[in-house]
Amino acid sequence: MTDSTHDAALRSWVESANDDASDFPIQNLPFGIFRKATGDDDPRVGIAVGDQILDVSACLDADLLEDAAKEACKLASGTSLNALMQSGRGPASSLRHGVSRLLQDGTDEGSKAAKAESHILVPMSDAELLLPARIGDFTDFYASIFHAERVGKMFRPDNPLLPNYKYVPIAYHGRASTIEVSGTDFRRPVGQRRPPNAPPEQAPTFEPSRGLDYEAEFGFFIGTGNQAGEAVPLDRAENYMFGLCLLNDWSARDIQAWEYQPLGPFLSKNFASTISPWIVTLDALEPFRVGAYQRPKGDPEPLPYLHSEANERSGGLDITMEIAILTEKMREQRSEPYVLSRSFFREFYWTIFQMLTHHTSNGCRLVPGDLLGTGTVSSSGSDEMGSILEKTKRGAEPLTLPSGETRSFIDDGDEIILRGYCERDGYRRIGFGECRARVLPARSLS
């Protein structure tokens, strides 16, 4: 349900939040963790508004919040969002509503907060953005049928989807320790690889990956966890979620092709994952809820535990994913990042609520701060692809960039930039900010 915080007419005394191009208008108010760029202070909870960060602890010190919002503010006075996540959606929602009133132009609360501007606002340009939570575990799904079909055709032209795909939200267990915040560079991975057409007797080599790929995804953070042995019903799944971020689950396709049988990806996917620093809450995304993807005629209905009328009616999210590249040569030429593709999350075969319910269906415990990835955001259009593997058909059809360079996969020095945003008539556009990382050369093997 939408409420007063979604009103498109709301204006903020933070002028940059009124810019139509801003990802962070007063209607958004995503949560994150920051510290001042000097590095002298401990990390703090912040809320993005325009090009500024509202320091939540400073609001508490200045006694600007009341009642439920004030109590929630106390939960958000630590060095991560985990305590606020653990408390469930209610406190975070109360804090978001209280901050919305503080930041509104022309109200008594807004006028009081504006007088304290220098104490409660930090320019983003003067801040270091950090991982928003202590991430205990990471699971990555494979929930775009368009991505699965395109990739499957490269390996199994006559049978791209395995029989379980339309019944089971497929996932693998990732590595939380290698998740880094946007702006963190990483080294090209090394590993075992063997050309796909090599004879069986040919031994693999151990060398830097030649098939580095991005995977443009959304991630969603667990808020209130479930107890071990407790399955979360589909109609209650959203009560266990805190919000969404951008996620790039970097993949070494050549290493993956050699290692994935019989137990799936391992070293090809656990060397680096990048997330955006701001978590957009489900409350902020309410205006952009849509029906679940309508399965083609002849596809099986989800099993009963993965089906509900509410999920069919409003389980989807209408978010656009944008992927861009910035190469070393483009930086030298002072060129803007080149947009490789756009795709649409509303066309996912499984909703995030089905993913969470399936994850807990065997009694698996999820805890506050756990991160679940959606899988690559690819949609039905011929150019709506969330990985370079799809765009180049496994490297067979290289891309030509405006700089004159070509790419079959990602080169050293390349920076991939993800952006996500929601648009709908009658509502303010909101965004997720950026998720970016640059590839450094592999470590020396000598």
Image (cartoon, rainbow, N blue to C red):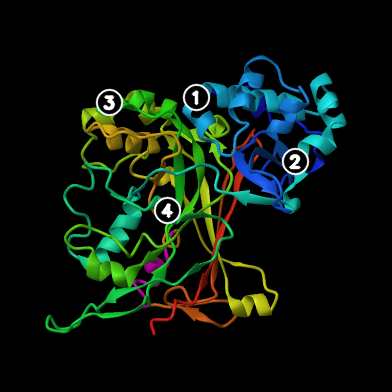
Q: Residue drawn 65% across and 75% down?
A: 331
Q: Which is nearer the N-term, disc 1 or disc 2?
A: 2
Q: Residue drawn 47% across and 38% down?
A: 317
- Which residue is labeled 4 in the image? 177
The three-letter code of the residue at mark 1 reads Ser
Cα–Cα gap, marks 4 and 1: 24 Å
Cα–Cα gap, marks 3 and 2: 42 Å
- Please state which of the two labelled residues, at mark 4 or mark 1, is closer to the viewer: 4
Instruction: For mark 2, give the secondary structure.
Output: helix
The three-letter code of the residue at mark 4 reads Ser
Q: Which mark is residue 87?
A: 1
Magenta residues, as a range? 386-396
In this orientation, which residue lies closer to the viewer: 198 or 205?
Answer: 205
The three-letter code of the residue at mark 2 reads Ala
Q: Is residue 354 left or right of residue 239?
A: left
Q: Quadrant of residue 115?
A: top right
Query: Can residue 138 be found in the magenta stretch?
Result: no
- Tell me if mark 4 has few (under 14), some (14-19) or many (20+) residues whose alpha carbon lies within 10 angstroms of its own: some
- Please state which of the two labelled residues, at mark 3 or mark 4, is closer to the viewer: 4
- Which residue is labeled 3 in the image? 230
Cα–Cα gap, marks 1 and 2: 28 Å
- Which residue is labeled 2 in the image? 17
Q: Which is nearer the N-term, disc 3 or disc 2?
A: 2
Q: Quadrant of residue 428?
A: top right
The three-letter code of the residue at mark 3 reads Glu
- Tell me if mark 2 has few (under 14), some (14-19) or many (20+) residues whose alpha carbon lies within 10 angstroms of its own: many
The answer to whether the residue labelled 3 contacts the one labelled 1, judged by CB atoms less than 8 Å apart, is: no
| Residue 2 seen in this snapshot | no
- Tell me if mark 1 has few (under 14), some (14-19) or many (20+) residues whose alpha carbon lies within 10 angstroms of its own: some
The answer to whether the residue labelled 4 contacts the one labelled 1, judged by CB atoms less than 8 Å apart, is: no
Q: How many marks?
A: 4
Q: Residue drawn 29% across and 60% down?
A: 266
